[in-house]
């Protein structure tokens, strides 16, 4: 194999390896799992839910200042998984793109258009030698005025796609297979059932029960299309409902 | 220079004050001293109008293009395509209106490909006004944008400097005053199609007859959820009528009273031959 031709730089910057791989992009995916957190997104019949763990490693940390859920426009929300600084950078860029769209075209950007725009930007990083890809993955949720509830994910490779349900992070493989099993029969998911399915997915994959303070849940519903986070009381109510069902 | 902004004093005895006329005459004479002419008002010449009716919008325009005081085109098209269900009437400098609408049509096409959805009229208006404002009114086109999109039927009027109005009925161009008077009198919300077409036709006809810069035929464009009906030459109010009969005088109508013949005797003075260049 022509190992010497790239002088080994194919692992250092985003150029092709002789096998046709981009090592830097693959390392970026590893960085997403580095944070140790897992996030889940599920699309119901008239709502979309994103859920992530809230780990407070340091007892002196003020937990109200720590969050991985962000509002990109009043109607589009997202959960970021991976490197915290890269996450904030991508969220900021998304907000700028959405704002410019509103200014130039006079109406709110749609979730799939915004996701495609961010994916195109991420793709540039996989081609430019001077910039590394971002080590974070965004799951975006919204109620589209024409298409209804939508769930999109865009990753460091510049690939984006719409999903019925998806998981990102340290335990994403297990979480994805759990979701596949549960959604195989294509059940009717009301808003409450969607939230509870997300919570049970995470707790079964991580084999632990959660307290309300250890979860962050963001929702958009057809009745209330504005992206909002559930309060601790609401999360507690869902946890109680799950416990009662079992 | 008499640059006074003071209101002129009334002469004793009332009546009109012609202070400013005297000032203008002095200005004209002092300008012509240096060889300059006072600027004259430039007529743009068009009547365009639009209304929102029960099922969509009806756009109307006259078809005369003028070159100062001469008719340059008796049957030009002033209703331009922007998107499958969005059309735009253009008044003002003909080239500016034409090119601006073509640029908008391109932008809308790209936007549609990017989003995969049909365009919004609000988006067209937003891009138009941002472009016109950037050129500070030097792009002399006044436009009426109307159409149907997912949110319903909308009508906007955009001015050359970039301001816009969203209204149920609008008119633009030199014949706008004539046309708007018809609308102000007879417009009702949620009219039926035939009533709406008649109203727009009458408004444009008012412009054609009462404004020198507008004339020839009336073009209409009806846009609904189902599609577009472009009615070119919907009405031709200035068409010459048919003559009812022959008005030539028969030979012999005028009686000949006297006849005198005086022959001229002409002598050939000079003869010359000039060969024509037929190459």
Image (cartoon, coloured by chain):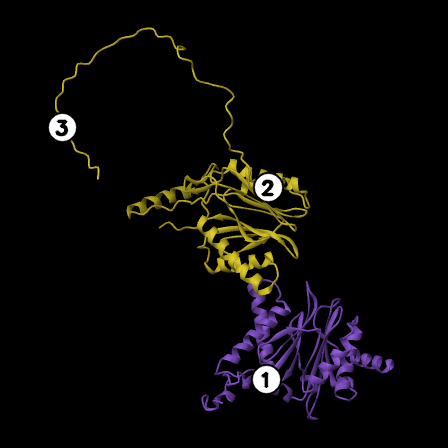
Chain colours: A purple, B yellow
Name the residue that disc number 2 marks: B200
Up the image or down, B268 lies above or below A89; here it is: above
Front label number (2 vs 3): 3
Q: Residue furthest front?
A: A1
Residue B62 visible, this orientation: yes
Q: Is residue A33 left or right of residue B161?
A: right
Name the residue located 74 percent from the left edge and 88 percent from the top edge.
A206
Q: Chain of mark 1?
A: A
Q: Residue furthest left?
A: B270
Q: Quadrant of residue A241?
A: bottom right
CB contact under 8 Å: marks 2 and 3 = no
Query: Both on one chain, marks 1 and 3?
Result: no
Q: Picture coordinates of residue B160 (x, y %)?
A: 49, 53
Name the residue that disc number 1 marks: A135
Name the residue that disc number 3 marks: B272
Q: Picture coordinates of residue B207 (x, y %)?
A: 53, 39
Up the image or down, B43 lies above or below A152; here it is: above
Query: Both on one chain, marks 2 and 1?
Result: no
At mark 3, the secondary structure is loop
Q: Quadrant of residue A106?
A: bottom right
Name the residue located 58 percent from the left edge and 87 percent from the top edge.
A27
Instruction: Report the quarter where the C terminus of chain A lies.
Output: bottom right
Front label number (1 vs 3): 3
At mark 1, the secondary structure is loop
Of A30 and B169, the residue lying toward us: A30
């Amino acid at each position: 194999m022509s190992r010497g031709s790239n002088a080994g730089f194919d692992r250092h910057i985003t150029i092709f390896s002789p096998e046709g791989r981009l090592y830097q992009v693959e390392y970026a995916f590893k960085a997403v799992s580095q944070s140790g957190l897992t996030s889940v997104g599920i699309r119901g019949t008239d709502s979309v839910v994103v859920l992530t763990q809230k780990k407070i490693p340091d007892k002196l940390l003020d937990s109200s200042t720590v969050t991985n859920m962000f509002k990109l426009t009043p109607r589009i929300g997202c959960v970021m998984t991976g490197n915290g600084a890269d996450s904030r950078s991508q969220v900021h860029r998304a907000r700028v793109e959405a704002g410019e769209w509103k200014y130039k075209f006079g109406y709110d950007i749609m979730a799939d258009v915004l996701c495609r725009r961010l994916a195109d930007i991420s793709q540039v990083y996989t081609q430019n030698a001077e910039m590394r890809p971002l080590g974070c993955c965004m799951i975006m949720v919204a109620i589209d005025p024409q298409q209804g509830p939508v769930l999109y994910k865009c990753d460091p490779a510049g690939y984006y796609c719409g999903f019925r349900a998806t998981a990102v992070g340290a335990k994403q493989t297990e979480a994805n297979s759990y979701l596949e099993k549960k959604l195989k029969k294509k059940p009717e998911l009301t808003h409450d059932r969607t939230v509870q399915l997300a919570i049970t997915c995470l707790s079964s994959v991580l084999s632990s029960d959660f307290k309300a303070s250890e979860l962050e849940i963001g929702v958009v519903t057809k009745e209330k299309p504005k992206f909002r986070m559930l309060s601790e009381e609401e999360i507690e109510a869902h946890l109680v409902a799950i416990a009662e069902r079992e | 220079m008499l640059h006074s902004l003071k209101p002129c004093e009334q002469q004793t005895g009332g009546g009109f004050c012609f202070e400013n006329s005297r000032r203008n005459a002095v200005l004209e004479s002092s300008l012509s001293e240096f060889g300059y002419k006072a600027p004259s008002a430039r007529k743009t010449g068009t009547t365009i109008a639009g209304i929102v009716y029960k099922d969509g919008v009806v756009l109307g325009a006259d078809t005369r293009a003028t070159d100062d005081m001469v008719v340059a085109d008796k049957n030009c098209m002033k209703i331009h395509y922007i998107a499958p269900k969005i059309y735009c009437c253009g008044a003002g400098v003909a080239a500016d209106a034409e090119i601006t609408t073509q640029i908008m049509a391109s932008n809308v096409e790209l936007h549609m490909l990017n989003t995969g959805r049909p365009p919004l009229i609000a988006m067209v208006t937003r891009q138009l006004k941002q472009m016109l404002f950037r050129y500070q009114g030097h792009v002399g086109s006044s436009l009426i944008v109307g159409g149907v999109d997912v949110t319903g039927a909308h009508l906007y009027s955009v001015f050359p400097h970039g301001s816009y109005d969203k209204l149920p009925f609008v008119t633009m161009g030199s014949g706008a005053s004539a046309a708007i008077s018809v609308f102000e009198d007879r417009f009702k919300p949620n009219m039926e199609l035939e009533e709406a077409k008649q109203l727009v036709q009458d408004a444009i006809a008012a412009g054609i007859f009462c404004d020198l810069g507008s004339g020839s035929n009336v073009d209409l464009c009806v846009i609904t959820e189902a599609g577009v009906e472009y009615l070119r030459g919907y009405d031709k109010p200035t068409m010459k009528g048919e003559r009812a009969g022959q008005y030539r005088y028969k030979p012999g109508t005028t009686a000949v009273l006297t006849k005198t013949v005086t022959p001229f005797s002409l002598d050939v003075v000079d003869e010359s031959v000039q060969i024509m260049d037929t190459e």
